[in-house]
Amino acid sequence: MTDAGPRSATEWRAAAQTFATEYVRPRAESIDRDDRIPSELVRALAAQKFTALGLPPDWGGQPADTATVSAVLEELAAASAAVAVTLAVHLSVCATPISQWGTAGQQASWLPALARGDRIGAFGLTEPGAGSDTASLRTRYEHVPEGFVLNGSKTFISNAATAGLLLVFASRDPSLGSHGISAFLVPGGTPGFSVTQRFDKLGLRGSETTELLLENVRLPATALLGPEGGGLKVALSALAGGRVGIASCALGVARAAFEEMRRRVRLEDADWKRTLLARSFVELASARALVEGAARRRDSGQPFTTEASAAKLVASRAAVFIASAGMDVAGPSGAISGAAPERLLRDARVFPIVEGTTEIQELILARALLEDDPPRTA
């Protein structure tokens, strides 16, 4: 593939399809088996400007709306969920928050390297024992004359082992609750920052998931992203956008499982298999409608948090249903380690957990629907 210039949404999807076919799909099995995305594949992603999608052109970004990024992630995930999730985290919850909340100096310092793929981004919010309760963060920061010092730990953090930049959240004072949380830009390799464990996961293998330790990590005053005490707002806005991205990845896995199932049903026709195929199509179409609807709302400037949670919930559910049905259709041959149905099912099963569990999405939806005035309807 040649170096990418400005592209339309259709051209970006086509480029992602070609890249997935030529670069990603041939490596998908080894990525899963070795639990590693080859560095040359990450460089190839960057060379095609996928790492710059949606970032400001002034800092090396490529103009792209949410719907375009969603389409690219779907195409990549249909070949390898790990590759797509790695890119989704980089764009949605690290680079984009800097675009939205960063000062001109922060944007100039970090966005060009992120756009080029010289640095891959990560997002450090979840902690052992804190789960989805952001107000109970135990990672602390304190003011020092030259800036800040961070101490604490994070867990289940994607991309962190090789990340060039992490967006990390810490609390100044637990008595302040959510109002004491601030966001910090922590370069990879900063003294005191270390990866203490890389988890061996069921699915999304190749997408790094790690535990982090921060011991007297000293940061300059310019490391603060957004206003002090405004970290929760930064986190929630990043997570809302991130859920559209993760839903797009789940949609890609669901589509891949559906296509694999359809291929097998054509080879061995049976009424019960046709029924599973039909049910899977409905699940896939429902997920696609919600994912594309959430992307459109975000691109039009409308509130989209409710739609993002619905999209993430339903796309995750569709991926699990279709991959499970695909395993039933495949039979024993699909259960062999490394077979496409087996890998797709393991990948699919992770999506109801990451970026907020199904139960968390249901709580977000219920709260939003009860607070809507006038009430939101589908």
Image (spheres, grey):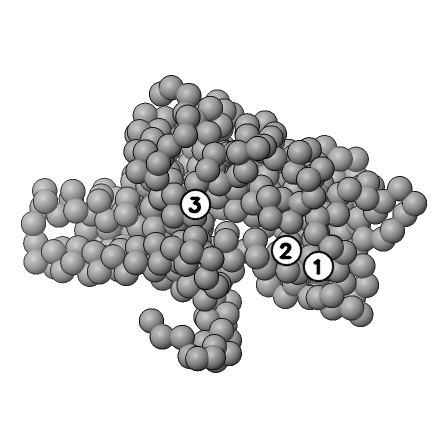
Q: Which residue is mark 2?
A: 234
Q: Are marks 1 and 2 in contact (CB under 8 Å)?
A: yes
| Residue 149 seen in the current view | no
Q: Which residue is mark 1?
A: 230
Foreground: 359 or 285? 285
Q: x%, y% of residue 283?
A: 26, 60
Distance (Cα) linking label 1 and label 2: 7 Å
Is 6 situated above or below 308? above
Q: x%, y% of residue 359?
A: 48, 68
Question: Left or right of 162: which side holds 141?
Answer: right
Q: Which residue is mark 3?
A: 65
**Amino acid type at mark 1:** Gly
Foreground: 145 or 29? 145
At 41% from the left and 58% from the top, the residue drawn is 297
Quadrant in which the C terminus appears: bottom left
Q: Secondary structure at mark 2?
A: helix
Q: Are marks 3 and 2 in contact (CB under 8 Å)?
A: no
**Amino acid type at mark 3:** Asp
Distance (Cα) linking label 1 and label 3: 26 Å
At 42% from the left and 56% from the top, the residue drawn is 300
Q: Quadrant of residue 316?
A: bottom left
